[in-house]
């Protein structure tokens, strides 16, 4: 459910706590781990943070956040204020996916498509006016089965009732989110 857009971290943690209460000692360790997020629900504002820490330690992810300073409008005040905005470097995200394991990379980037399917996709793209002169598609030394089309998306996202962030997301167009 998580990572497929079908459930929030808060919903999964709440469901895990309900399962833990029902099964007690018989609950799987993974259910107990999800139930423990946010100090077993006592601090729900920390559930996502706890999940990120847990996954980082579990998979030894080496992602670091970087900050860029931007001038932002302060609500109910005049003028701008410099603020640090954290972000992840796209190439580091892709690197972590690549080294995680073959199945994770296939699920996240190729959608489990075969090399032949990927080459067929790029052949189709080469027929389109907008793409036929793209350097990666015209260079014969570039193996087309290793090219992954990446989509960038930007949107506003409200995380708490009093704050909205501009969020950039990246993803392979081979993956549908199923």
Image (tube, rainbow, N blue to C red):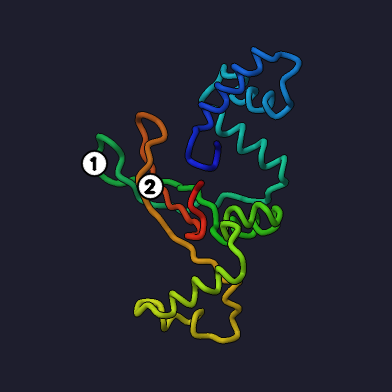
Give the number of the mark in front: 1 or 2. Answer: 2
Q: Which quadrant is the N terminus positioned in? A: top right
Residue sitting at 71 percent across and 45 percent down? 59
The x, y position of residue 141, in whole percent, is: 60, 85
- At numbered mark 1, what does the secondary structure look like: helix, strand or loop? loop
Q: What count of labels does the image hold? A: 2
The answer to whether 142 is drawn above or below residue 48 in the figure is below
Q: Earlier in the sequence, mark 1 or mark 2?
A: 1
Which residue carries the number 1 mark?
Answer: 78
Toward which corner of the image does residue 134 lie, by quadrant?
Answer: bottom left
Residue sitting at 68 percent across and 53 percent down? 103
The x, y position of residue 81, in whole percent, is: 35, 45
- Bin the neighbour count of mark 1 within 10 Å (Cα to Cα): few under 14, some 14-19, many 20 and up: few
The answer to whether 15 is drawn above or below residue 109 in the figure is above
The x, y position of residue 101, in whole percent, is: 71, 54
- Bin the neighbour count of mark 2 within 10 Å (Cα to Cα): few under 14, some 14-19, many 20 and up: few
Q: Which mark is residue 130?
A: none
Give the side of residue 166 with respect to residue 142, left or right. Answer: left
Along the line of sight, the residue nearer the viewer: 68 or 48: 48
Along the line of sight, the residue nearer the viewer: 130 or 93: 130
- At numbered mark 2, what does the secondary structure look like: helix, strand or loop? strand
Which residue carries the number 2 mark?
Answer: 166
């Amino acid at each position: 459910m998580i990572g497929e857009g079908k459930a929030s971290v808060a919903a999964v943690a709440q469901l895990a706590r309900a399962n833990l209460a029902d099964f007690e000692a018989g609950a799987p360790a993974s259910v107990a781990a999800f139930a423990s997020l946010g100090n077993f629900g006592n601090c729900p504002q920390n559930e996502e943070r706890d999940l990120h820490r847990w996954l980082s330690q579990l998979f030894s992810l080496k992602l670091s956040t970087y900050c860029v300073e931007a001038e932002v409008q302060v609500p109910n005040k005049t003028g701008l204020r410099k603020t640090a905005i954290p972000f992840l470097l796209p190439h580091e995200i892709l690197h972590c996916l690549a080294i995680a394991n073959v199945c994770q990379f296939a699920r996240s980037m190729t959608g489990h498509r075969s090399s032949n399917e990927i080459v067929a996709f790029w052949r189709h793209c080469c027929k389109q006016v907008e793409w036929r002169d793209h350097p990666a598609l015209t260079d014969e030394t570039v193996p087309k089965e290793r090219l992954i089309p990446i989509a960038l998306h930007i949107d506003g996202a409200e995380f708490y009732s009093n704050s909205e962030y501009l969020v950039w997301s990246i993803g392979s167009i081979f993956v549908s989110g199923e």
